[in-house]
Every structure is written in C-alpha cells, then in structure tokens.
Image: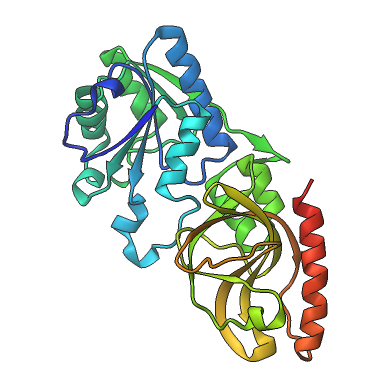
Amino acid sequence: MASFTVDWRDAAPGVCRDGTVAVGNFDGVHLGHASLIAAARAQATEFVGPAVAVTFDPHPRDVLRPDLAGPLLTTTADRVRLLQEAGADHVLVLRTTHELLHLTASEFFNQVLRDRLAVRRLVEGVNFGFGRGREGNLDTLSDLCRPAHISLTIVPPVVIDGAEASSSRVRSSLLRGDVEEAAKVLGRPYRLHGITAVGQRRGRTLGFPTANLDPLQNLAPGDGVYAVRVYVGEEMWPGAANIGPNPTFGENARKVEVHLIGFQGDLYGQSLAVDFIRRLRDTRSFKGADDLVRQLRQDIAQARQAVIV
C-alpha cells in the first residue's frame, strides 16, 4: 500500500494506473465511503489491478470559498490510512487548485481519469458530482465511460437508523455533542488531533492535570464533558475531555482540555489523538473549586468505566 500527493497535471505513479478507481473527498471516511472502497476492492480483485482511491487536498470548498473554510472531520493522514484500511491499495491525493476545479466534467474525465490514470473501472456513489461547479453527475459519467470502454459501478448509499451515512450527518452529530451517533455512522469512535500547549495549569493545582490542545487539526465536538481514549505515540490512556469555556473561573474562551487518567509526565508540545467514546454531561459553572473537584472525581470515575472495557 502507498499514498501519493501529486499535481493533477503530473503523470500518475505507475502503480495507480490500469485499475479500479473511486473518486471523492471522503471526509470522515464513514461507512458509506467504506462501502464504496469495498466495492472497488472487489472489482480490482475480480479483474486484476489496483484499487485506487482518488481524493483532494485541501478540500475543494476551502479553495473555492475560503470564507466558508472550516475544520474537516479527518486529517489528510487519517483519511489516507482509513481508505487503505477500507481496501484501497493506493491513495492518490490531488493537490486542489483553481485550475483543477475549473476543469469541465469532460476535461476531468479525459485528462485525469483516462490519460493520467488509465482507468479501467470506476466505482462511485449515487450522489457523485464532478467537474466545474459539479456539472457532471452519474448520467454524465456513464455517457463518458461508454465510448471509452470503462465499466461503471454505482454503489447504493449505506442507511443507518433510517438515514444515509454522510459526512454532513457526522458533522451535525458531533456539533451537538452526540459522539455515539457519529461513531455509528463512522463505524469507529471519532478521533480529534491536536498539539498540547501551555494552559492556565489550573487543573494541576486542583489535582487533575490536563493537556490543553491548541492548535486542533480537525473538528472539535460540541461543548461538554466526554469519556475519551487518548493516544500518546503508541500508548493509550483512558481520559476525560472538557470542551468549552470555564465559567467557574470566568474564562470565556473555548478550549479542549484532556485529563489522562493515571498518566504522569510532561505532554507539552506533543501531538495527541483523542477518540471520543461517550458524552458525560454539559459544561456548567460551579460555586467554587471544591464543588468543581467533586464533579471532576465523578467525571473521571464515569470516564474510566466507559473507556476501560
């Protein structure tokens, strides 16, 4: 397995050519995306050749509408890893530029898929759109594939609890703090990445030191207290995360702070990965430090029970 980041005008690596290709943003790599890649994997196995996921970095929205840019569900590194775990032999990341996004559907098909990738089979979902302004749809793609003798497989959506799996559904669940709903759609706990920075050190004085994540590398769930698993390198620690302001001490800035249960050591400057398992409660103000400490003990006990199974 390998991943490559290239300009769309460059020749594709040889191992990515003459295979089965699925194209998409794949933000979150949820169960719908996994189903698409599994279908590509099956096609590649049957007809011999690589299964290749083609994706984009940065997200096209961030290039076309930087005013609407915001954090994604997955880092590029996680997206590549998850696509490979879903069955892709290789992941080709196209650098997103205005020139790429202004290709018509026909130009994208011919210049990227046919000429550079020599695609033999395409696998896409029912909502696939491509080309300038997403002018191309499945009918367009089918019309382009037919004379090029490229087979096209359409994968139906994955339905979970009566609704389609989608990146927007995961995002909505996370923003309202429903990390368990997000995990259903993702097929795994949601993972947040961040670098630990120096904070107020108030948690240490209360007996519950926390890692203050700033900057974050992807979308933080909505405000609340959560049971989490924290990865420091290859080691996993149970933990409790607080997202939001600290009204007890008059702090209005939104923070992501994580307490690693049982951990001793210095985490400043380290990269942490945090998997969200369960939302425990809302953030709220306490009368003082003593009340806060009592609540923190309860939070940690609940987090330990939720995480250690």
Whole-percent x, y for residue 158 in the image:
61, 33
| Quadrant assignment for the N terminus | top left
Kindly indicate the quadrant of the structure image that contains residue 92.
top left
| Quadrant assignment for the C terminus | top right
Q: 177 or 88: which is nearer to us?
A: 88
Tell me what residue is drawn at x 48 percent, y 24 percent: 154
Up-down relation of residue 294 to residue 118 (above or below) = below
Tell me what residue is drawn at x 77 percent, y 82 percent: 292
Q: Is residue 300 left or right of residue 252?
A: right
Label total for image:
0
Q: Residue furthest top?
A: 47
Q: Is residue 215 left or right of residue 162?
A: left
Q: Is residue 29 left or right of residue 69?
A: right
Q: 253 or 259: which is nearer to us?
A: 259
Up-down relation of residue 196 to residue 159 (above or below) = below
Q: 122 or 287: which is nearer to us?
A: 287
Do we see residue 26 in this rendering? no
Tell me what residue is drawn at x 41 percent, y 8 percent: 47
Whole-percent x, y for residue 197 in the image:
48, 72
Whole-percent x, y for residue 264 in the image:
63, 65
Whole-percent x, y for residue 221 in the image:
60, 62
The figure's colour scheme reads: rainbow
Do we see residue 89 in this rendering? yes
